[in-house]
Image: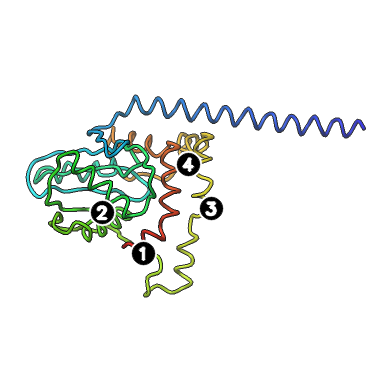
């Protein structure tokens, strides 16, 4: 009986420590996110697109207007080197898809078609008129292709940076396609919880997250801060779950 009592105490202690650590992680994430929001305000404007706001930042003058759409797992700060260079020649706008960067989350799916409709509403409400030279990087290239097919009269040109190959492409071997469908799936499912518990933020503070190239300061600090929010990983998970629909749309 004494051994059983000690075992119960040990289990209770472990569970209690786990609850305390989880609570501390939640507070750490909440405080860190709040501090980052004050430290790194959006550089552009927040535009109402139907009950939630999306962020777009435009600089330069001229036509056509260049629209920069970021990688699937980043934000508009990734264009910190490109946007100023393009702005010397024409107007250039970098925006955050809903749920990423400084944009608020959307109630709709995160497939390409819904992103296109939201971007169209964003550009209309922000009075940013075409024609557009659309530059899409990775998942942003999916949005660009569907946007060009949906609103061809608004597109002056389309630049695809690392566009990748859609799921189910007839030229991709079946075994490779199957690997693509399962790649990172496990992490995508648990990532929102890792973010909520402050684990991803702690990993970033310890230098354990992927690098960000040679982005200049202070954009690099803002870029990192936006990648550590719970909202980012919730949206990333939804986007990953929508890849089958996005591939069909592309």
Lower position in the chain sequence, tag 4 or tag 3: 3
Query: Horizontally, is 216 left or right of 229 in the view?
Result: left
How far apart marks 3 and 1 lie (CA) works out to: 23 Å
Mark carried by residue 46? none
- Residue under label 1: 248
Mark 2 neighbour density, 10 Å: few (under 14) some (14–19) many (20 or more):
many
| Secondary structure under the numbered disc 3 in the rendered image | helix
Lower position in the chain sequence, tag 2 or tag 4: 2
The structure residue drawn at horizontal position 28% and vertical position 56%, both measured from the top left corner, is 141
Which callout, 3 or 1, points to the residue nearer the camera?
1
The quadrant in which the N terminus is found is top right
How far apart marks 2 and 1 lie (CA) works out to: 18 Å
Which callout, 4 or 3, points to the residue nearer the camera?
3
Mark carried by residue 186? 3
- Residue under label 4: 208
Instruction: Report if the CB atoms under discs 2 and 4 are less than 8 Å apart.
Output: no
Lower position in the chain sequence, tag 2 or tag 1: 2
**246 relative to 233, above or below:** below
Query: Horizontally, is 46 left or right of 201 in the view?
Result: left
């Amino acid at each position: 009986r004494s051994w059983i009592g000690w075992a119960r105490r040990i289990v209770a202690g472990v569970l209690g420590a786990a609850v305390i650590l989880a609570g501390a992680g939640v507070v750490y994430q909440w405080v860190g996110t709040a501090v980052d929001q004050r430290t790194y305000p959006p550089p552009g404007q927040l535009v109402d697109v139907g009950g939630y706001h999306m962020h777009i930042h435009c600089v330069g003058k001229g036509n056509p207007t260049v629209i920069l759409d970021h990688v699937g797992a980043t934000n508009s700060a990734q264009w910190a080197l490109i946007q100023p260079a393009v702005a010397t020649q024409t107007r250039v706008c970098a925006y955050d898809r809903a749920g990423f960067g400084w944009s608020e989350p959307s109630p709709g799916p995160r497939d390409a078609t819904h992103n296109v409709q939201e971007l169209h509403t964003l550009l209309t409400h922000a009075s940013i008129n075409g024609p557009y030279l659309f530059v899409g990087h990775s998942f942003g290239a999916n949005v660009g292709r569907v946007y060009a097919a949906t609103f061809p009269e608004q597109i002056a040109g389309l630049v695809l940076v690392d566009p990748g190959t859609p799921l189910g492409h007839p030229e991709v071997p079946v075994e490779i396609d199957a690997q693509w469908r399962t790649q990172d799936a496990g992490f995508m499912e648990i990532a929102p919880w890792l973010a909520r518990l402050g684990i991803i933020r702690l990993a970033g503070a310890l230098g354990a997250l992927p690098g960000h190239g040679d982005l200049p300061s202070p954009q690099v600090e803002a870029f990192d801060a936006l990648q550590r929010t719970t909202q980012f990983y919730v949206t990333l998970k939804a986007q990953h779950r929508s890849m089958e629909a996005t591939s069909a749309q592309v």
